[in-house]
Image: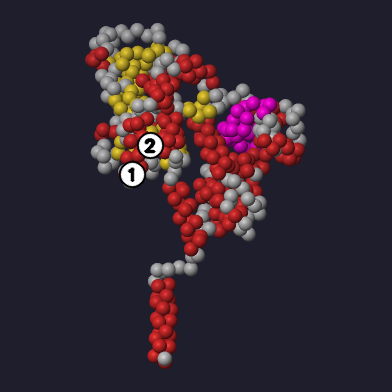
């Protein structure tokens, strides 16, 4: 009996010593199993997101009547929708930076046109073609080339597609010149102003730009068809196969045909009737919004994006919960800033700027300047209390409370009892997924306004 007792005692001591040894070497920790499981679930949710970068130019990403649209923008959004995965789209308007980011393997998809055939697959992994285009000559309508003279055709610095002058009269009189630090938009302005006589760009860009320039016209095609592809992340083997399969199937659909007609056809009603009408404006309230934002140090592009999200610039909208007007502020907030349903649009915008400034001041010393408008947009939608709660949860669980993506995950988790009943939470239950989607839409549009509306 004593031997049996000693055996149990020996086993107990050996177990304790083994546990101490493992703790000493970091093999096990005191981290509770439940938080660890939650953290893994959170990471999995984040990894489902498809990250994309689009080069900002008139054919693929622009703002139309307050809304962000474009061929590649719509195509990538449709990809995410069909795959059931959220998509985050970043914008780059510097071609040199877009080129470098294409090589960085930082994004799942990069939508930027350059000569990818110069790179082997180990450096650049291309998707299936999502469309095709070709180089075209752009000139002024009254310009008739004198074939006895030399002609300079200007191209942006990053334009690398092969040009063939053999289709033009006296091919040897034509010379291609790349202009350092100039974009294709700059060249269109210079051609309109008669600073240059010719430029070359891709057909899909040309038909989108020409409605803005009534004195310019589309000249002859000066090159062969070439495919437009995405740069894919080399490390995403499974996702890349899925993307290529989706492109292969989607290009056979009527939906893809409609997308091409909308953006890549000269018969497009969107292009022919609308592009040139609001080139330098977002809404008819631009001057008022610019004025009220200037007084409070706010970016008017951001406030414009909030207004579009709330009311589409309509002043007579009635919302759920009693919100009203162009800013769709709730009655208690309107009362704080002296607004009623009889207030003018200008008075509503002044009150809206005051409220946005109030929210900005809550977060200005707590988050990085590059992140602050994400938090302000979230607070405008949910109220600042729920965003403050999500930041507290994020910090408690080892996250970065100054990073919106991390805070957004805990805002979503506030709909679960174990999170909204946490002692650091002061405002209780909240279904945060709606607000996270709201912020994504506001910030995507805001970046579009910044890049396209000066």
Q: Is residue 168 magenta?
A: no
According to the picture, the residue beneath numbered tag 1 turns out to be 238
Quadrant position of residue 257: top left
Rendered image quadrant of residue 181: top left
* Residue 310 belongs to magenta span: yes
Tell me which secondary structure the magenta stretch mostly adopts.
Answer: helix
Residue 422 to residue 148: above or below: below
Is residue 138 at all visible to an observer of this figure?
A: yes
Which quadrant of the figure has residue 258?
A: top left
Q: Is residue 323 left or right of residue 20?
A: right
Tell me the tag on residue 110: 2
Frontmost residue, 264 versus 2: 2
| Span highlighted in magenta in the image | 291-317
- Residue at x 27%, y 12% (from the top left corner): 168
Residue 173 or residue 351, whichever sits in front: 351
Other-residue count near label 2 (Cα within 10 Å), few / some / many at <14 / 14–19 / ≥20: many
- Dot 2: what SS? strand
- Determine whether 205 is above or below 329 in the image: above
């Amino acid at each position: 009996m004593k031997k049996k007792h000693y055996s149990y005692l020996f086993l107990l001591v050996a177990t304790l010593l083994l546990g101490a040894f493992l703790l000493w070497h970091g093999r096990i920790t005191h981290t509770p199993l439940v938080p660890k499981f939650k953290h893994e679930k959170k990471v999995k949710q984040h990894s489902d997101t498809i990250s994309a970068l689009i080069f900002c130019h008139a054919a693929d990403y622009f703002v139309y009547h307050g809304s962000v649209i474009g061929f590649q923008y719509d195509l990538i959004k449709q990809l995410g929708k069909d795959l059931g995965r959220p998509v985050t789209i970043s914008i780059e308007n510097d071609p040199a930076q877009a080129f470098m980011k294409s090589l960085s393997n930082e994004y799942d998809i990069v939508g930027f046109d350059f000569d990818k055939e110069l790179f082997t697959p180990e450096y650049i992994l291309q998707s299936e073609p999502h469309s095709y285009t070709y180089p075209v000559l752009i000139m002024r309508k009254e310009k008739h080339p004198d074939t006895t003279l030399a002609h300079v055709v200007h191209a942006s610095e990053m334009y690398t597609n092969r040009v063939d002058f053999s289709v033009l009269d006296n091919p040897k009189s034509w010379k291609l010149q790349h202009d350092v630090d100039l974009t294709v938009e700059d060249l269109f302005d210079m051609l309109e102003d008669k600073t240059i006589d010719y430029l070359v760009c891709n057909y899909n860009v040309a038909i989108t730009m020409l409605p803005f320039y009534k004195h310019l016209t589309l000249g002859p095609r000066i090159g062969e068809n070439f495919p437009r592809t995405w740069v894919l992340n080399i490390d995403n083997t499974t996702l890349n196969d899925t993307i290529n399969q989706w492109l292969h199937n989607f290009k056979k659909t009527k939906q893809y045909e409609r997308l091409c007609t909308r953006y890549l056809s000269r018969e497009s009603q969107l292009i022919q009737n609308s592009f040139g009408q609001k080139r330098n404006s977002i809404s008819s309230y631009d001057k008022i919004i610019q004025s009220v934002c200037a007084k409070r140090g706010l970016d008017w592009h951001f406030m414009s994006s909030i207004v579009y999200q709330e009311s589409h610039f309509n002043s007579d909208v009635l919302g759920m919960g009693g919100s009203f007007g162009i800013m769709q502020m709730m009655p208690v907030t309107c009362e704080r800033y002296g607004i009623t349903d009889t207030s003018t649009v200008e008075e509503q915008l002044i009150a809206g700027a005051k409220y946005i400034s109030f929210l900005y001041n809550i977060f200005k010393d707590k988050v990085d300047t590059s992140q602050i408008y994400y938090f302000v947009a979230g607070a405008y939608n949910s109220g600042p209390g729920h965003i403050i709660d999500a930041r507290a949860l994020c910090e408690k669980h080892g996250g970065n409370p100054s990073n919106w993506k991390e805070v957004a995950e805990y805002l979503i988790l506030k709909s679960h009892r174990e999170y909204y009943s946490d002692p650091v939470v002061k405002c209780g239950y909240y279904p945060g997924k709606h607000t996270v989607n709201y912020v994504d839409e506001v910030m995507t549009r805001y970046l579009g306004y910044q890049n396209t509306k000066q």
